[in-house]
Amino acid sequence: MARINRELNPTRMTPEVRAKLRQSHLGKGKGISYEKTHGRHTHRIVMEQKLGRPLREEEIVHHIDGDHRNNDPDNLMVLTRSEHVNLHRAQGDLRRKSG
Ligand SMILES: [Zn+2]
């Protein structure tokens, strides 16, 4: 069936499109979307991989562009808690949960 659909509809439902749809519907997919991987914050895991070492308790991973879903290594930076608070204050962002 899949093969026939692909031939009839070559542009609409490519495997790529299907994968995207599946991800957006499930949301809980293993490490693909959303914030957590194996119960840990994905951005912390990404940063640990970038640093090549585990993060310390007091280290905060900040999302540079403010988009918590953007876990691109280039969008993440490590700060201490106080640095992090100061940064958000400087940005006029007092929301505690902001990343
Ligand atoms: Zn932040």
Image (cartoon, helix red, strand yellow):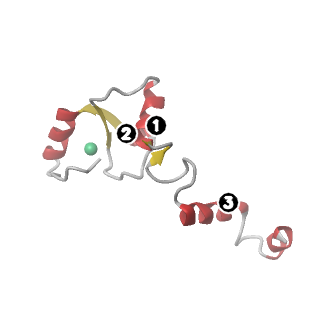
* Residue sitting at the far top: 53
Per the image, label 3 sits on a secondary structure element best described as: helix
* Pointer 2 residue: 76
**Contact (CB < 8 A) between labels 3 and 1?**
no
Q: Is label 2 within 8 A of ligand 1 (CB to nearest ligand atom)? A: no
Asked if 46 appears above or below 52 in the picture, the reply is: below
Q: Quadrant of residue 79?
A: top left
**Contact (CB < 8 A) between labels 2 and 1?**
yes
* Residue sitting at the far front: 39
Kindly identify the amino acid type of the residue bearing the numbered disc 1: Val
User: Quick check: 8 left or right of 85?
Assistant: right
Residue closer to the observer: 13 or 95 = 95
x, y percent for residue 10:
77, 70
* Pointer 3 residue: 16
Kindly identify the amino acid type of the residue bearing the numbered disc 3: Glu
Within-10-Å neighbours for mark 2: few <14, some 14–19, many 20+? many
Q: Residue at x 44, y 38 (%)?
A: 73
Q: Residue at x 86, y 73 (%)?
A: 4
